[in-house]
Image (tube, rainbow, N blue to C red):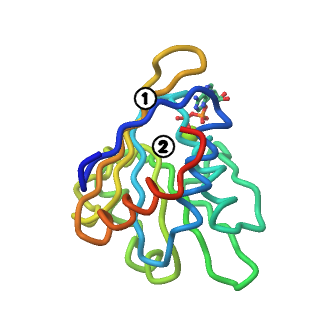
Amino acid sequence: MSKQDLNLISQSADQTRQLGKTLGALLNAGDVICLQGDLGAGKTTLVQGLAQGWGSLDPVSSPTFIIVNVYRRADETELYHLDTYRLESAPEAAMLDLDDMLDAGPLVIEWAERIESILPAERLWLKLEHIDEEKRGIQINAVGAAYENLLEKINANLTGF
Ligand SMILES: Nc1ncnc2c1ncn2[C@@H]1O[C@H](COP(=O)(O)OP(=O)(O)O)[C@@H](O)[C@H]1O
Ligand SMILES: [Mg+2]
């Protein structure tokens, strides 16, 4: 592992959830977590674990027409889950007030590559790739000192990989 990169193989949906859980437990308001990967790569599965690790009281959902989901925690902070799959255009993306979300909590984004132009330069980027039925390659890249630090903590806290 370098300071910026960590490459993992997940052998199951549960293992991907476990990675999400480890990551979620480390997140604070203002953190940007970007997920890239085709349909079925495991983005939402990872978010399920992430929300759990963060302490969400609400289950993760992917309703058909919702673009932003907000999950609550006992301390009333919020976790934002953005799925840009159904965004039609760049202007539509520009209407999302990412700054407002980031003031209130961490933000995790599925299909982040579709709105890359409006994302902060510093972020954690996870690329998920289908290898076979149960196996996924997960490449994690940290941009910025805070995210390098986060990546180091993920690596230290990760079990089962
Ligand atoms: N190693 C794995 N990691 C994540 N999901 C996996 C894995 N192996 C099998 N799966 C299955 O693949 C599907 C991933 O779906 P989902 O998380 O909704 O993907 P996405 O949000 O990227 O479209 C789920 O049905 C999940 O159970
Ligand atoms: Mg999804």
Residue drawn at 24 percent across, 70 percent down: 145
Element carrying mark 1: strand
The quarter of the picture where residue 121 lies is bottom left
Q: Position of residue 65 (x, y in %)?
A: 61, 47
**Is residue 85 placed above or below 69 in the rendered structure?**
above
Q: Is mark 1 within 8 Å of ligand 1?
A: no
Which residue type carries mark 2?
A: Arg
Quadrant of ligand 1: it is top right
Q: Residue at label 2?
A: 86
Q: Position of residue 138 (x, y in %)?
A: 42, 36
Q: Position of residue 17 (x, y in %)?
A: 63, 44
Left or right? Give the position of 134 relative to 34: right
Residue drawn at 44 percent across, 53 percent down: 155
Residue drawn at 76 percent across, 56 percent down: 59
Circle nearer the N terminus (1, 2) = 2
Q: Position of residue 46 (x, y in %)?
A: 58, 45
Element carrying mark 2: helix
The quarter of the picture where residue 79 lies is bottom right
Front residue of 106 and 53: 53
Q: How far apart in space, not on screen, are marks 1 and 2 (Cα)?
A: 25 Å
Left or right? Give the position of 151 relative to 105: left
Which residue type carries mark 1?
A: Gly
**Is residue 7 placed above or below 74 in the rendered structure?**
above
Front residue of 71 and 85: 71
Query: Residue 67, which numbered label?
Result: none
Q: Residue at label 1?
A: 137
Label 1: few (<14), some (14–19) or many (≥20) C-alpha neighbours in 10 Å: some
Q: Is mark 2 within 8 Å of ligand 2?
A: no
Label 2: few (<14), some (14–19) or many (≥20) C-alpha neighbours in 10 Å: few
- Judged by depth in the image, the label closer to the viewer, 1 or 2, is 1
In the image as oriented, which residue stretches furthest toward the top? 132
